[in-house]
Amino acid sequence: MAAAESGLAAPPVCVLVLGMAGSGKTTFVQRLAAHLHALPAEPHQPGPRRHRAARPGRGGGPGAADIRDTVKYKEVMKQYGLGPNGGIVTSLNLFATRFDQVMKFIEKRKNASKYVIIDTPGQIEVFTWSASGTIITEALASSFPSVVVYVMDTSRSTNPITFMSNMLYACSILYKTKLPFIVVMNKTDIIDHSFAVEWMQDFETFQDALNQETSYVSNLTRSMSLVLDEFYSSLKVVGVSAVLGTGLDDFFVQLSKAVDEYEREYRPEYERLRKTLEEAQNKQKREQLEHLWKDMGSVCVQGSTLAGSDDATAMGPSELILTRGTLGEEEERESDTDDIDHEVTEESHEEPAFRNFMQETRMKYQRRSNPNE
């Protein structure tokens, strides 16, 4: 999280950096941290970070938080028998289960921090289309102003077909995250990004570039370019060199506009969704409580109705259990009489046998005492 000391209580801005593998995301995050640190500011970058980074916490300074400090990537692969991509997905899922700790950490530093810069895995689909990526994105967006930054490799987008592929992916991420969106055309130190901006603003120029391509994909790209015209019109684009640090001032200007857009359009939507969810939960609780009261009321009514009935067999199990031991006097006398009769019957069977035993014992004793008789 790149933090600028400020006395204002405004919440920090969360910057989610996405992009294809090799587009320069981590280098861009390093440059942002260094730029903010020089303002001066205290850079800090909470995970998830790239698993393939050469050094842990690189570019983040003393306040960097690395996913590799929480999840051991190689141990996950060994324990679950996964390959590299499966290990990344599982590690991100495990990290998402502890992301509430990251949220608490950001919450504690919200008065002293201005930006939260989040570097994502190089395998863009791992974060963009996974459940854990959605959880992390929505958790941040529902609590703090959040902006998605799509880093694009300008040097590899000189081909109109490759350029269109990048734009389609950017468009899909925009509609997936539903957050303010900035396209950062990185590596302008290799080639200037003006050609890409011209393609986005002038349809005829892009068509001329496509005419040099004769493959089937070029025909598909030509059709798709018509669809993306509206997407281009509202898209924020800035050219940056993460190596040289050029273009960062323009980036922060666009970032400020994106934050205003979040506060104006996206925050009310998130507040509405949160309110709707709370109302649905409260409604479900009320319905469960009403069902409980109805069930309890039916039991009470049934018990009071059967209380005056002489037919005990009509009572349910619960009423029989509740009334057991409090029967009428007549039933108690009948029960006691039955117990006494059983005892008398048992004694009547035992007396003759005992009398015969005593007589036989007496006769044996007499015979022993008078052997002459």
Image (cartoon, grey):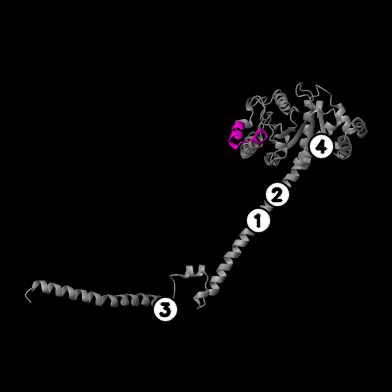
- Say which element carries label 2: helix
- Circles 2, 4 touching at the beta carbon (< 8 Å): no
Instruction: Inspect the image, locate mark 3, and give the three-letter code of the amino acid beneath it.
Output: Glu
Task: Name, please, the residue furthest toward the left.
Answer: 372
Q: Which mark is residue 213?
A: none
Query: Disc 2 marks which residue?
Result: 275
Nearer-N-terminus badge (2/4): 4
Query: Disc 4 marks which residue?
Result: 168
Q: Is residue 281 above or below residue 223?
A: below
Nearer-N-terminus badge (1/3): 1
- Circles 1, 2 touching at the beta carbon (< 8 Å): no
Q: Is residue 325 left or right of residue 98?
A: left
Query: Disc 3 marks which residue?
Result: 330
At x 73%, y 34%, the residue is 124
Query: Looking at the figure, which quarter contains the C terminus?
Result: bottom left
Query: Disc 1 marks which residue?
Result: 284
Q: Nearer the viewer, residue 244 or 109?
A: 244
Rounded to the nearest angstrom, the CA distance separating label 2 from label 4 is 33 Å
Nearer-N-terminus badge (1/2): 2
Q: Nearer the viewer, mark 4 or mark 1?
A: 4
- Say which element carries label 3: helix
| Number of other residues with Cα within 10 Å of mark 4, as a class: few under 14, some 14 to 19, many 20 or more | some
Instruction: Inspect the image, locate mark 2, and give the three-letter code of the amino acid beneath it.
Output: Lys
Magenta stretch contains residue 85: yes
At x 84%, y 38%, the residue is 231
Q: Nearer the viewer, residue 148 or 71?
A: 71
Residue 117 location in percent, x, y?
A: 70, 31
Rounded to the nearest angstrom, the CA distance separating label 4 from label 3 is 89 Å
